[in-house]
Amino acid sequence: MSVTATWRTSTHMGRLLPLVLVILSVAAQARGQAGVPPDADRLMARGIELHQAGDILGAIDAYKAVLAMAPARADALSNLGAAYVRLGQYDEAIKQYEAALQSDALNNAVRLNLALAYYKSARPNDAIPQLKRVISSDPEARNAYLILADCYLQTGQEKELVSLLKPREQMFAGDLSFAYLLGTALLRQDDVVGGQEYVSRVFGAGESAEAHLLLGIAQFGQHDYRAAKTELETALKLNPKLPTANAIYGRTLMLLGEPDASERAYRRELEFNPNDFEANLQLGNLRKSAQRFAEAGTYLERATMVRPNDLAARRLLGSLRLQTGNTEEALAILESVAKEAPDAVEVHVQLATAYNRLKRKDDADRERAIVDKLNAEAAAKQKGGSL
């Protein structure tokens, strides 16, 4: 059997989700551990005792001593990873979990711990494949479904979130985290009717910041920005640190013509949620426009880290690289954007500039011809629509 330690963290649900880090006991040693010296078992038991008592540094010393005797021992590697998580040393924790999985690739508890370390350290794209494998091995892993759904929400994969959670209504009956995640995804997809069902569930549990945030998202999607502002302000009064609320509030304020207040809202979001995509994207754009290029680069790099496939973030980063003279890097980014968005005139203009700087005249001429063609097509459509 095993003992567990509870690891709690703020999520996009604006509440505390119980995330379980499994501490493997001596009796639950991983496969292939036969023949381990008795001294190692005693040290392992001592490490677990210290770990549970809160003496994390002492536990780390004990686990390291075990590994000096048995370097591939999966339970010691996993527990050492869990100890590093307690210290906030996520990179070191990830290294230990990956080593444990090399020794015991089928250990679902260790794989979940690895996913949680990625999730806690704001690397949702790395957590996603691990969580998928956990769920594949254990279709009843409720916590893994919710964390995977939140990773999808953070990375803008609303369609995948809906496909994951919608068929599992019975599994999560009455679970407000489930209702909040699914409702948010549906509203982001402009499914107001479907999203409203889950908004009602969250409101049904009593007034909460989450409920007002959901209603604000719905009103924002319907372009009722004044009403959205009111709901978002209520949400933030109830919970000023509610993840994503300040970012959506900032976007609402920008559309209402309040740019200074909007920027302050984005900055507040990053105080509590430094990897929020929307806040990083918008602040990067604002800093780029103000020619504060170093700051813009920090924000836009973080935005593309969170959502590496987002065209808007990549286009802005490519444009920034072009402005700051990093032509080769700009070219690589802009070429990839043009493949996915071939009708984006601005991207082709920037590509022509990049090719010119690199003395690639034929490529520059080709891009200018594409720009002329796209502009002519747009003018013809506008003329036809005005008749």
Image (cartoon, rainbow, N blue to C red):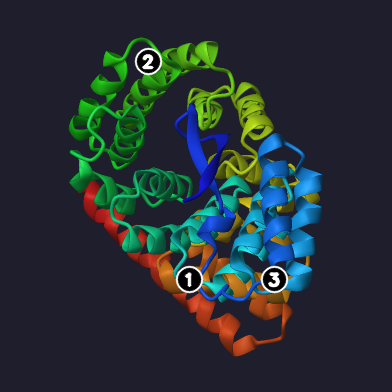
Q: Quadrant of residue 196?
A: top left
Residue 49 appears left or right of 251 = right
Which numbered disc, 1 or 3, marks the residue closer to the eye?
3
**Residue furthest to the front:** 38
Residue marked by disc 3: 37
Residue 227 is labelled as 2
Vertical arrangement, residue 291 with respect to residue 125, above or below: above
Callout 3: SS: loop
Q: Residues under labels 2 and 3: Cα distance? A: 67 Å
State the image coordinates of residue 121 (x, y, percent, origin top left). Answer: 63, 49
State the image coordinates of residue 295 (x, y, percent, origin top left). Answer: 77, 46
Q: Is residue 318 visible?
A: no
Which numbered disc, 1 or 2, marks the residue closer to the eye?
2
Q: Say which amino acid is labelled 1.
A: Ala
Residue marked by disc 1: 338
Q: Is residue 387 visible?
A: yes
Q: Quadrant of residue 263?
A: top right
| Label 2, residues with CA under 10 Å away: few <14, some 14-19, many ≥20 | some
Q: Say which amino acid is labelled 2.
A: Ala
Q: Say which amino acid is labelled 3.
A: Pro
* Residue contact between numbered discs 1 and 3, judged by CB atoms under 8 Å: no
